[in-house]
Structures are given as C-alpha cells and as structure tokens.
C-alpha cells in the first residue's frame, strides 16, 4: 500500500491528503435541513448530513488527490451513528480509488493493540469466513506504550500489506511538553523517531517503509532533524494551513528524491467555502470551493517539493 | 462521580474493577452456537455472543463490585457490530448501578480531543435536544500530546461531573522504553505524574481528584514513587493477576486513608472458568466462576488494603 500511495503521489504530483474531519458547523444549511427532515433532528440526522457533506467533497476532489485522512473522533462524537458514517466514508473513498489513512491514534498493551489492529486493518475469522471491521489502508498509532504496543499493529500490516503512521512530533502548541524533553542530549521525539525507523525495517516497501511517522508542519527545524533520523520513513505532516504551517517550511521534510512527505489539510479544504478567497462559491458550491482549495494547496506545496527534485 | 466511586469502594470493601474485555475464545460454546444460530455466523452473531457472555458476568458480579472497565478495542475489533455491544454493555452496567470506566486511551490535538470528549463523556446538541454517544462515567486518556490534548477532556468532565484516568506508567513489558527515559534525574513517567497532579487540581472531588492516573501493578517501586507525586490522584491499576502483578506489591499504592487505588482484573475474572482452581464450574457455570474469582480477588486485595487503614 505504501508503493501504491507513492505511485499515486507521483502521478498526480500531489503529496497531499485531505482530512475528512467534518464538524456540524462546516455543513451548508440546506444539506443539514434535508438530512434532519429525512432522518430526524437527532444523531442519525446529523450523521446523514455529514455523509452527504463528505460525499460532495469526495466526488469533487477524488481525481486530484492520492489519499484521504478521516479523523475518527469527528465521527465518534456522534456515537454509533457517527461511526457508521466513518465506515461509509472509508468504503466510498476506496471505491473512488483513494488510499484511506484512518486517523485513529490508537495504541495499548500488546493483546489490546492486536484487537485494534484487527478492527482497523485486519480481519476476524468467524466460522469459515473472514470479516473486516473498518478496513482502512493505514492508521495512525500512539507510541507511548513502547514496542509491545506497536508490534501487533506491524504484524497485521505485514499480513495485509498495509501501513501505519506513528506519532513522533505532533503539530499542537503543547506537543513539546513531553515530546521535547531531553533524554541525555536528545529530545524524546528523536528517540521515538529512531524507534520508528527501526520498526520500519520490519516492513519495507520498494523504497520506503510501510511504517511511517506523524511529524507536524509547525516545527520545521524538527522536521529537518527527523528526516535525517528516519530516511526511509514516509512523513504524514499535519498542521499545514489552519494550524499555521507553511509550504516553504516543508522543503527539508522531503528527501532528495522529492518523496517522503504527505501533507494534510482538513479545515482548509473541507470548509474552504467559509474562508477568505473562496466567498464566490457560497454554501451551495462548497464542494467546488474544496476542489479549488486542493488545486491551490497542490501548487503551494509544489514550490517546496520542486526544490528537492 | 469520583465521590460516588469512592463511596461504593468503601461500602463494598472492594477497591477493584472488572475488565470486560471479552475474546471469542473466552465464550462458552453453547452461547456462541446459539448466537450464530439466531444472528448468523458473522460479525453480528459474534457481537451477540459477546453481549450474552457479558450480561451473564454482570448479573453474577454487579452486587460485589463498584465499577467495570470495558476495553473498547475488544469490541472495536468487530467493527460497528462490536461497538454496538460496547454501548449496550455500558448502558446495562449503568442500569445495574455500576460505575463505567471506558478503557479507550484516546488523545489527540485540542479540537480532536474535544470531539472524543463529547462522544465518550459529553453530549452534542442537535436542534433543541442533547444527545449522548457512548456516555461512560470515566475514560482512560493518553498524555503524549501534552496539556492541550488533555484540557478539552477536563472541560467536559467538569461540565458532566465525570472523570479521567490518564496513562502514566503502563503495565506492559516495554512500557519503560519511553516512559522510563530519564529527563535530568527523573523518569518521564514522574514528569507525566506531576502533570496529572496539576491537571487534577482543576477538577477536585471531596478528597480525591476526578482526574486519575493509570499506574501498572507490575512495577511496585514505581507505584510507590508515583503515589507520593500524586497524593490526591486515584490510581487505576492494571496488570494484577494474568499480567503478573500481586496484591502484596500494591500496599504502597494506597494512601494512609486506605483509598486512592482501584485494581483491575480482566481475564482473571471473566475467563475464570478456564483457569486452575475453577474447574468445578465448567463452561455452563462460567458466570458463577467469575463471581467466585471476584470474591477471591477482593480477599487477596484486602490483605494489601487493610495494612494501610
């Protein structure tokens, strides 16, 4: 799947991923009202509105992008009804040929990580048949519990030719509180990065590992250091756009082959119609606004990217 | 809710929690076959079998214990069908008067943590009505992203009078890989513990904070050190029993008031009928075996507990 992802990034000249992280206040009023009329003004109605909203965006951008990254929390907040739409979104994106990165940030002790891996990447055998739970292509994983919390995910990835992005340095303001603490003369995130590089050797694709890392766009000097520590690791980079990360800061995240990075934008794409520069679209053409925002983002990222090729 | 939990622990003389972490191979064959006949040999059938299994155990032990801790991964592995049973289990346990600790280990950047907090502890307002997703009383949370990933959970806890258990030192063999790394002369888990104590001051109950910590039973000397750093923090202690933690190792986890600890056992209780000493029950009386295992665990823990009172 990492080889597929890279091939798509190269074909589309688009090292970017759209974060499908819907909030109710992103959804144009007509979509919301129609869903409430049809399903009721309740969790089911809200979930249906999210599905309509997502589908509009996916249909408008799927030919421009290699991958999507639905953030499961935005669905989980609506309980079971929300998670039904999370699954519906995954299935629809895969039908459209998109690689799906489930942003689930799971992680636990060994047997529990194995259960998460089964539910998100693998399958359960019941009787003579295999069944799949959420069936993403990649998921994000939290490293705080160490190797025995990570290896069960890698085992399933190897069986399924799927992958992970493990949190190394996150994009949020207080990410440094623990991640930047010095162990000897190195910050914790470097130690985690080194571990990710080691885990990555367990499951290599053609030129990059199936085991990637999450490294925020908001700390460029950190991205540069981590790139050196993890040369064969794909970096999933959140924090571009709404969180303040800029394309020019990302040049050092790329390898000399022009690869190794996939930049995420969520609000900046899916709620583009609400933002400066996209007023002409209006709520009725929210999906066209998202398409334009993807084109603009691709051009913006290309500046950083082309420097490296 | 922390006051309620403590009151129940004192009334029942039982500082313990049963981990409802079902695996298909724990479920007696007749329950499994009945569920497959009724719902089909598929995810729905498996989920129904888990529900029957859980209900049997809950009915057999609810009067002896203050709380249960369903591990969401064990349900999530069966996708949506599994999560339906996770929710059904929560609701049933609450009907039975049990405090429910959702072992979800969520944690993300601020806006995403807010969404998880809404889905598990809070409510969404749609139209004029409030709706609740999973509605646990407590959940477990991962601290790797720092304060701005934790505070949104605490905000919802304050509104709802609910609580958290934040991972500090986990029970698994490789927990030390990152958690034990020395920052200056202190291990990372002590730094996290200190932060948990500070976060805890934001949401105090009568004598303990609503913001607790997860500290594994498998590292007694660590428990002792963390007890001092977090005097008003309730410790949720996994790793007793199947993972190798012993009651006598837990004496220093308790405060002098005999409080401050709730010990989890999962497999040791719910799969007791498969274990040495419980053969006489057999699969048909698996729930009675679980009841006996709770009684035995309570007596075992009491030895450590009484020392401190």
Image (cartoon, coloured by chain):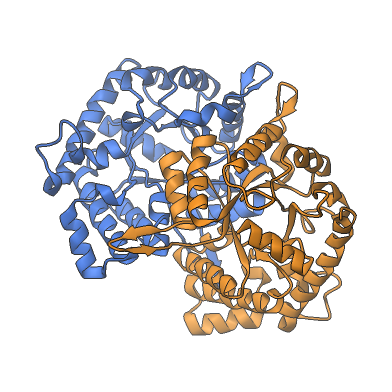
Chain colours: A orange, B blue
Whether residue B103 is visible, yes or no, is: no
In this rendering, the answer to whether B309 lies above or below B241 is: above
Whether residue B47 is visible, yes or no, is: yes
In this rendering, the answer to whether A233 lies above or below A284 is: above
> Residue A57's image quarter?
bottom right
The percent position of residue B107, horizontal first and vertical second, equals: 58, 46
Number of numbered discs overlaid on the protein picture:
0
- The residue under the point 52% across, 70% down is A85
> Residue B146's image quarter?
top right
In the picture, the quarter occupied by the N terminus of chain B is: top left
Residue B234 left/right relative to A301: left
- The residue under the point 73% across, 78% down is A286
The percent position of residue B132, horizontal first and vertical second, equals: 46, 61
In the picture, the quarter occupied by the C terminus of chain B is: top left
> Residue B92's image quarter?
bottom left
In this rendering, the answer to whether A63 lies above or below A129 is: below
In this rendering, the answer to whether B33 lies above or below B150 is: below
The percent position of residue A29, horizontal first and vertical second, equals: 65, 79
- The residue under the point 54% across, 56% down is A161
Residue A97 left/right relative to B170: right
- The residue under the point 39% across, 63% down is A131
The residue sitting at the left extreme is B280
Front residue of B89 and B243: B243
The percent position of residue B160, horizontal first and vertical second, equals: 50, 50
């Amino acid at each position: 799947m990492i080889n597929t992802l890279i091939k798509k990034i190269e074909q589309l000249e688009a090292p970017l991923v759209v974060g499908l992280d819907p909030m109710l206040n992103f959804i144009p009023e007509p979509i919301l009202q129609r869903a409430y009329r049809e399903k009721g003004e309740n969790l089911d109605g809200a979930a249906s509105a999210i599905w309509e909203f997502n589908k509009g965006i996916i249909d408008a951008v799927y030919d421009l992008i290699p991958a999507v990254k639905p953030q499961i929390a935005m669905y989980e907040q609506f309980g079971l009804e929300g998670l039904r739409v999370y699954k519906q979104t995954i299935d629809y994106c895969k039908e459209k040929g998109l690689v799906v990165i489930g942003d689930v940030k799971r992680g636990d002790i060994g047997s529990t990580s194995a259960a998460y891996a089964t539910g998100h990447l693998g399958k359960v055998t019941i009787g003579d048949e295999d069944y799949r739970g959420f069936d993403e292509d990649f998921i994000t994983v939290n490293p705080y519990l160490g190797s025995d919390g990570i290896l069960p995910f890698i085992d399933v990835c190897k069986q399924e030719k799927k992958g992970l992005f493990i949190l190394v340095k996150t994009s949020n303001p207080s990410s440094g509180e623990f991640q930047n603490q010095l162990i000897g003369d190195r910050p914790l995130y470097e130690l985690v990065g080194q571990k990710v590089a080691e885990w990555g050797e367990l499951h290599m694709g053609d030129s990059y590992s199936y085991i990637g890392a999450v490294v925020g766009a908001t700390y460029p000097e950190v991205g540069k250091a981590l790139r050196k520590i993890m040369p064969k690791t794909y970096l999933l980079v959140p924090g571009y756009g709404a969180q303040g990360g800029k394309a020019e800061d990302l040049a050092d995240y790329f390898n000399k082959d022009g690869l190794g990075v996939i930049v995420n934008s969520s609000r900046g794409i899916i709620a583009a119609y609400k933002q400066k520069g996209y007023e002409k679209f209006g709520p009725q053409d929210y999906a066209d606004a998202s398409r334009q925002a993807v084109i603009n983002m691709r051009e913006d990222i290309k500046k950083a990217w082309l420097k490296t090729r």
